[in-house]
Structures are given as structure tokens and as C-alpha cells.
Amino acid sequence: MIKVAIVEDNNTLRNSLTKLLNQTEGMQCVASLPNLLNVVSDLRKSQPDIVLMDIGLPNISGIEGVRTVKENFDNIQVLMFTVFDDDEKIFEAIQAGACGYLLKKSSPEEITDAIVSLYQGGAPMSASIARKVIHSFQQSSPSGLSEYQLTTRENEILYSLVEGLSYKKLAEKYFISISTIRTHIKHIYEKLHVHSKAQAVAKALKKG
């Protein structure tokens, strides 16, 4: 059972998302919050695996909310769910610790598929968002990460993490075992001095 918390100030949308999750096999909405004012205590009580979080929240923004969640909960992953598709908001959210970025125009199936993908180790993004992130990589200097001495395969895997591929999909893409993928990712984390996929992607984007 994938336990999901929702942080969304639009009551109608929040209720619709709650209903969607509870009607989807293998998922349960364990918290439905209109804002981030008591997010730490609310998440401690509900213990979700994933937080589906809006950016444009009252009082405290969703990007600040990501930072708060990551500072207090190592095991909770955040999936942004927003109308914003501009580069600044995307990269701010990723750098803050978000592991996925979904636009609100996504279909119910796309929403549940993204939650499953994130739970299984992927980094789901709406297609238009993934294109923006990849374009950023393509426009950046290829030497930005050279100081970290990543191997060709490690660079390939890091790039594929940005595309949202899970460990299973990475193994299929490069014709190697999942355990080998885990070893490569461990080495990437060590070389970049990070502890998560989100931090690795954020550092790669920052360094070009």
C-alpha cells in the first residue's frame, strides 16, 4: 500500500485527489492538508511514503514546504503538483528536494502512474517538464561535472535519472542488473557528495 499525503489549498481539487487515491488499488490517502502550517506534526501522525504538493500555497509556498519535509523526514518523497511550468519554479523545486514534477492538467491515470513510478525509484515528470530539464542539460557546458570524474556510464545513468527512469527501466536500458545500477548510483552519490536522486539531479543542473 502506497501511503500518500496531499497538500493542496483548492478544496474541490483536494477532495477529488483524495477520492482518486482511495479508489486506486494499492494506494491510500493518509492526510489531506489545505496548507503547510502544521505539516511536520501532520506528517509525523500520518507517516506517508509520498507527499503530493502544490507550489502556490497560502502563507508558506510549496517549494519551502519541500525543504521542510526533506529536513524532517529522510524517507518521505515529494511530488510537486502545480500549474507552474516555468524553468525557475522547476529548478527551485528540484534543488529543494522534490523527486518529481507533475502539472495539474495531468490525467488521473498520469497522476497515479507518477505516484507508482516515484514509489518504485523513478523521478516522474510531465513530458513538457522533462523536455525543459533535458534542454537545460543540452545547453549547458559538458565540462561542468568534470571535476567529479564521473565515468561515461555514470553520466549516462545520471542523465537517465532526469528522464524519470526507475532502477528497473535503467537496468533494461543499459542491459545490466538492478544491483549493478544501484552500485553505479551509489558511486554517483559518493562522487557528487549527495544522498538522493533529487540532490544529484540538482547538482548536475547547477554545474551544467
Image (cartoon, rainbow, N blue to C red):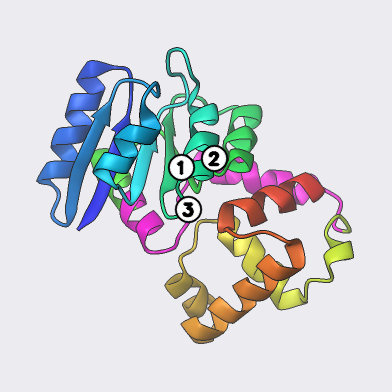
- 39 left or right, relative to 146: left
- Asked if the residue under mark 3 is in contact with the one under mark 2, i.e. CB atoms within 8 Å, the reply is no
Seen from the viewer's position, the closer of residues 33 and 137 is 33
Secondary structure beneath disc 1? loop
Q: Earlier in the sequence, mark 2 or mark 3?
A: 3
> For the residue marked with disc 1, what is the amino acid?
Ser
Q: How many marks?
A: 3
Q: Residue, x 85% and y 57% (percent of image)?
A: 142
Q: Which mark is residue 129?
A: 2
Distance in Å between CA atoms under marks 2 and 1: 5 Å
- Asked if the residue under mark 1 is in contact with the one under mark 2, i.e. CB atoms within 8 Å, the reply is yes
Residue 12 can be seen, yes or no:
yes
| Bounds of the magenta segment | 114-142
Q: Is residue 53 magenta?
A: no
Seen from the viewer's position, the closer of residues 122 and 42 is 42
Q: Residues within 10 Å of mark 1 (few under 14, many from 20)?
A: many
